[in-house]
Image (spheres, rainbow, N blue to C red):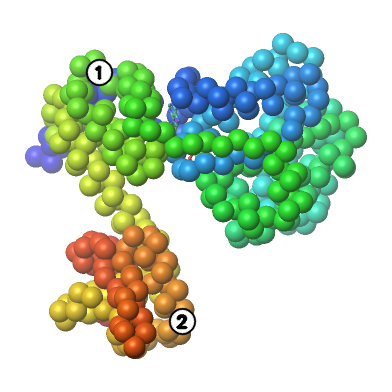
Amino acid sequence: MKMEVLDEIFRRVLSSKIFTNRSSLRPDYVPDELPHRENQIKMLGSILAQALRGSRPSNVFIYGLTGTGKTAVTKYVLKRIEEKSLGFKTNFTYAYINCRQSDTPYRVLADLNESIGVRVPFTGLSRAEVYRRFLRNLDARKCVMIIVLDEIDFLVKRHGDDILYKLSRVNEDLLYSQASLIGITNDLKLTETLDPRIKSSLGEEELVFPPYNAVQLEDILRRRAKRAFRRGVLEPGVIPLCAALAAKEHGDARRALDLLRVAGEIAEREGAENVTEEHVKKARAEIERDRVVEVLRTMPLHAKLVLLSMVYLDNKGKTRTTTGELYASYVHICRELGVESLTQRRISDLVNELDMLGLLAARLVSRGRYGRTKIIELSVSKKTILEVLGKDERFSGVANL
Ligand SMILES: Nc1ncnc2c1ncn2[C@@H]1O[C@H](COP(=O)(O)OP(=O)(O)OP(=O)(O)O)[C@@H](O)[C@H]1O
Ligand SMILES: [Mg+2]
């Protein structure tokens, strides 16, 4: 019986009525056209084209909110320059490093070595040695190299900006090669925390990526949908709705594409002939739920305990609570579980972090001459919290809160 059910699923997936090329909607796919980014492509292209003439392009600092095409445009332009460079005498090479994945200075330096064909061990060498190897080998190649550090904020927040400082002066140590840096971030406040010398060196050129509006998102989706979906399966309201929902957030193309892809997947799972607006609404709920589950799952222990304390209070009929009350029930739960509790100050910080993640809502209300107090509520359902945290063995002691 079970086998038949699976067979039916396989048959449905393999003979998709909805998609012709689902993977072209995936986040890491670099499309061959990027509408509404012509200016950014031209500007980045004209800066980096210096490399084709054998001179060092200016360093570039790229910023803009998430999903505004920074990574896609940068990869697109670099690919074109690399293709073009094949017909030139100049030696050109580039390294694309995502600092969320390569999140230590050592890893970044190791990746730089690897991008010019030098293998370094995972650990064991000093950072200085890995850097020296990179310089030596880069110089030996007699080339112009562009180094892209994407999502640079992940590196800077954890490890400071030393590595950026070093890399922004790399040319002082090179005789026969030259290198330029492209730094990318969606953290618009990052520059405030950077050393002014790095800021001015990295920001020789600055490129801003504004959010897309609903009309632009619609156009982007239409072009990408052509390749991904069978003709005629999208009902007319589907793309405008995905675009409108994503524009309302902040013009995030990734969000718009995710909505469209997941709506298609839901339609397919249901065995539907068409993708409808209803599927988009379901997709929105599914994406939001996945986000919450992922955040919950990967949260540190005490953040989980704070949420459990909120559930505990809620079960006692207190849907709204104050920091003091929350802290008392947090301490109680810690004691039950035999976990050492943190200070009220730390819990107050955690509440703010959970608020920023959209799991709690905390707001200050005035209580006249008693000053102000913070009122805290859950922003996600108790059911979801218990479902996810219930899988964490450490909480089995408080299963029936
Ligand atoms: N103009 C465009 N045309 C087609 N697809 C686009 C366009 N802009 C962005 N996309 C797509 O939207 C998704 C998000 O874009 P991208 O990854 O470049 O965003 P980002 O600015 O780097 O965001 P983050 O700051 O989160 O890294 C990608 O799948 C990308 O292919
Ligand atoms: Mg990116």
Q: Which-is-in-front pick, marks 2 and 1?
A: 2
Residue carrying label 1: 230
**Label 1 neighbourhood size at 10 Å, few (<14), some (14-19), many (20+)?**
some
Q: How far from the left and from the top, in percent, is residue 147? A: 69, 37
- Quarter of the picture containing the N terminus is top left
Query: Which badge, 2 or 1, is on the more N-terminal residue?
Result: 1
Question: Which quadrant does the C terminus fall into?
Answer: bottom left
Image position of 49 with respect to 365: above or below: above
- Image location of residue 386, percent across then percent down: 23, 67
Q: Which mark is residue 16?
A: none
Q: Residues within 10 Å of mark 2 (few under 14, many from 20)?
A: few
Identity of the amino acid at label 1?
A: Arg
**Placement of 60 over or under 304, stated as above or below:** above
Q: Secondary structure at mark 1?
A: loop
Quarter-of-image position of residue 51: top right
Q: Which residue of the protein is positioned furthest toward the front in this rendering?
A: 369
Taking depth in this image into account, of 319 and 306 the one nearest to the observer is: 319
